[in-house]
Amino acid sequence: MQHLLDFAPLVVFLVAFKLQGLYVATGALMIAMVLMLVADRVLLGRIPTMHWISTALVMLFGAATLLLHDKRFIQWKPTVFFWLVSVALLASRWIGDRPLVERLLAPALGPDAHLPRASWQRINLVWAAFYVVLGALNIAVARGASEQAWVNFKVFGLTALTFVFIAAQLPWILKRARTP
C-alpha cells in the first residue's frame, strides 16, 4: 500500500499533464503531495523524511513555476532532489554510525546478513554518484527535449532507471553478504 502511495503524486502529475498541460499538472502535483503527507500521517502515524523533503521542493519549485509561469522551475525539482540525496549519502559517511545506504538496505537483507563496512561505504559512494548523474540527466532532457518528452522521462524514465539501478546491485550485495 505504501508503495502505491509513493507513486500516486506522479500518476496525478501525468494524468493532469495529459489532460490540461504542465501548469495544471504542477498545481495538481502540489495538491497531491500535501495529500500524500496527510495519508502518511493517517496510515503510518508519521511522515517519512523523504516525503517531507520532496513535498517542500515541489511546493517551492511548483510555486515558482506557477507564479512566474516558467516551466524550468518544476523541471529542476527532480535534479535538486537527486542532488540533495547525493549530498545526504556523502555526508552519511561522517554523520551517524552507518552510511545512509546501509540504513536503507540492511533491513531488507535480514537480521542474519552482514556486509563489511568497506562494502557499504563503496555502495554508498556508487549511489551518490548515481544520483548526481540522474540529476544531470534530468536537466539534459529538460533542456534538450520537448516538454512531453521530459514529462515522460520524469515519470517513466527516472523511475525505471532508479529501479534498474537498485535491482542490479542486489545480486552483488547478496553474494557478499555473509551470515555470522
Image: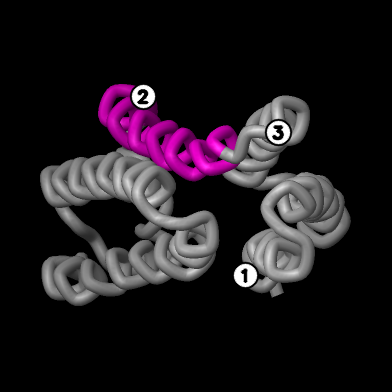
Disc nearest the viewer among 2 and 1: 1
Q: Is residue 159 above or below residue 84?
A: below
Give the amino acid type for the residue marked by disc 2 in the picture: Ile
Indicate whether residue 83 is drawn in magenta. yes
Which residue is label 2 attached to? 95
Q: Residues under labels 2 and 3: Cα distance? A: 39 Å
- Rendered view: 129 above or below 84: below
Does residue 95 appear in the picture of this structure?
Answer: yes
Q: Are marks 2 and 3 in contact (CB under 8 Å)?
A: no
Q: Main secondary structure of the magenta part?
A: helix
Relative placement, left or right, of 7 versus 107 is right
Does the rendering let one see residue 110?
A: no
Mark in the foreground, 3 or 1: 3
Q: Of discs 2 and 3, which sits in the foreground?
A: 3
The one nearer the camera, 179 or 83, is: 83
Please tell me whether mark 2 sits on a helix, a strand or a loop: loop
Identify residue for label 3.
69
- In primary-sequence order, the first of circles 2 and 3 is 3
Q: Is residue 123 above or below residue 136?
A: below
Q: Residue at x 60, y 40 (%)?
A: 71
Label 3 element class:
loop
Residue 155 relative to residue 12: left or right? left
Which residue is labeled 1 in the image?
3
Magenta-drawn segment: 72-96
Kindly identify the residue that appears in the image at 13 percent across and 74 percent down.
175
